[in-house]
Image (cartoon, grey):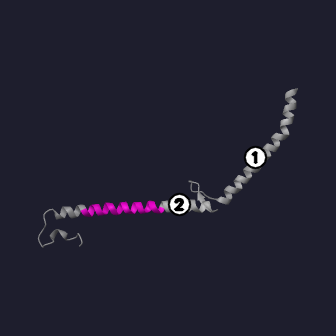
Amino acid sequence: MSLYGGETLTGSPVPGAKERIDGMMRRFGELSEEVGRLEGLVDEQRRDLEVQNSSRFGGMYDDGEGVVVMQSMVDQEEEQIRQLEDKIKAMQEKVTPHLITLARC
């Protein structure tokens, strides 16, 4: 049964029915808004989860600032860092004997 027109179920007004129906309609509106908000939150979390799952398998992920980063980009950066660290180590190995010689003088 619809709540509209429910205040006169028997053809005559039911005491307090209009107020109760108004309260129920208001509560229905509040609950509908809350359901909409929660559905939006679930959709957002689902998208975040999909992005996180895809990044595990070579996909993309969002760095939190709206920039999409591919796993291959991360791998490339890590390789460049390793190469630079190897260069630094090689240079230190070249310089260290000279520093030891200078320290003895």
Give the residue at mark 1: 85
Q: Is residue 105 above or below residue 93?
A: above
Residue corresponding to mark 2: 49
Residue at 57%, 59% (x, y): give it: 52
Outermost residue toward the left? 12
- Mark 1 / mark 2, whichever is N-terminal: 2
Whether residue 39 appears in magenta in the rendering, the answer is yes
Position of residue 27 measured from the top left corner of the image (x, y, whole percent): 28, 61
Q: Position of residue 96 (x, y in %)?
A: 83, 36
| Residue type marked 1 | Glu
Q: Which residues are magenta?
A: 24-43
Q: Is residue 91 above or below residue 73?
A: above
Q: Position of residue 33 (x, y in %)?
A: 35, 61
Q: How far apart in space, not on screen, are marks 1 and 2 (Cα)?
A: 34 Å
Q: Quadrant of the N terminus?
A: bottom left
Q: Residue 9, position in %: x, y?
A: 15, 71
Q: Can you tell which mark lies on residue 77? A: none
Residue located 73% across and 53% down the image:
79
Instruction: Tell me the quarter of the picture where residue 68 sits.
Output: bottom right
Asked whether, in this view, residue 60 is left or right of residue 49, the answer is right
Neighbor class of circle 2 (other Cα within 10 Å; few <14, some 14-19, many 20+) is: few
- Quadrant of res 32: bottom left
Q: Secondary structure at mark 1?
A: helix
Q: How many marks?
A: 2
Secondary element under disc 2, as helix, strand or loop, is: helix
Compared to 76, does 8 lie above or below? below
Q: Residue at x 57, y 61 (%)?
A: 53
Residue type, label 2: Leu
Magenta stretch, main secondary structure class: helix
